[in-house]
Amino acid sequence: MRWVFWFLVLFNIAFFVWREIDAPPPSRPLSVLPPSAGNLVLLSELPEAEPEGFEFDGLESMRLESDVIENADVAAPVREECWVLGAFDDHNELPSVAADGLIRRHKSAAQQELEYWVILGPYPDSSKADEVGSEIRAKGWDSFVINKGELLNAVSVGVFRERVRAERQLQQFVARGYQPVIAPVPRLLESYWLSLRGDPSKPLFDKELARLKALGNGLVQAEKKNCNFVASLREFD
């Protein structure tokens, strides 16, 4: 009877091992997606998400733009320096300059000034004016005949910028037996300049400044001026 017992024990062990080896793998439970999940998408097809901590709102974006502007290289304003040579009373006295240089020729705005002319006449014709003029010069006094304008055929015996000096001259000719008068005559005054304007840190500026000073020929001195003065002048060519 004992061998029957051991036979049944061995048979049961063998049957258990055979069931375990031959049994199919356990099935995994299926997960049911809700209807709102939509179609299935592969992981490779999903868009790349921004790393956590790099999400910016509008305010943060504006702050970044402001930092970029503040840290950007800002060009420093050019420091200009201005020099002038003049003034010249006649444009024919104005020296010539190179067209490719920094030196420019200018004319100031015309200003009106009164001059006071002490005159004899005007006379009816030029022959009478010439006669009186010759008579005055023969006595050693300066005079000239006016041959154009409103004082045509008058004889000038003096031109003054101050009325008080013109009146003294008038009294002298009255004492000599003449009947002079004072005629205020407006005069347009124009002056001419050379100017240099540029960045003094550039080598060309030093070269042009030396040239400007040389153009004065020792008679007219170059002066450093406010650049607003140069801007007020009109370019003259």
Image (cartoon, rainbow, N blue to C red):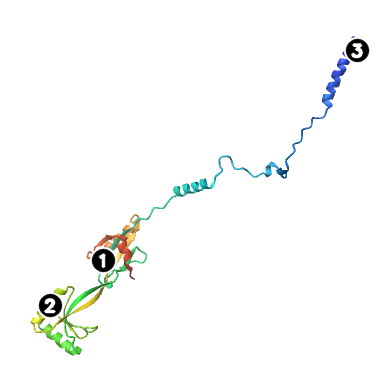
Q: Picture coordinates of residue 37 (x, y %)? A: 71, 43
- Which residue has dot 2 on it? 169
| Nearest to viewer (mark 3 / mark 1) | 3
Q: Earlier in the sequence, mark 2 or mark 3?
A: 3
Checking the image for residue 4, the label placed there is 3
Q: CA distance from mark 2 to mark 3?
A: 172 Å
**Amino acid type of the residue that numbered disc 2 sits on in the rendered structure:** Gln
Q: Quadrant of the C terminus?
A: bottom left
User: Is residue 170 placed above or below 93 in the rendered structure?
Assistant: below
Q: Earlier in the sequence, mark 3 or mark 1?
A: 3
Most extreme residue toward the front is: 35
- Which residue has dot 1 on it? 86
Q: Quadrant of the N terminus?
A: top right
Q: Is residue 198 left or right of residue 29?
A: left
**Amino acid type of the residue that numbered disc 1 sits on in the rendered structure:** Gly
Q: Picture coordinates of residue 160 (x, y %)? A: 17, 75
96 or 68, which lies in front?
68
For the residue labelled by badge 1, is the local secondary structure a helix, a strand or a loop? strand
Q: Picture coordinates of residue 105 (x, y %)? A: 32, 67
Decide if residue 40 is in sight here.
no
Q: CA distance from mark 3 to mark 1?
A: 142 Å
Q: Earlier in the sequence, mark 2 or mark 1?
A: 1
Q: Is residue 82 left or right of residue 21?
A: left
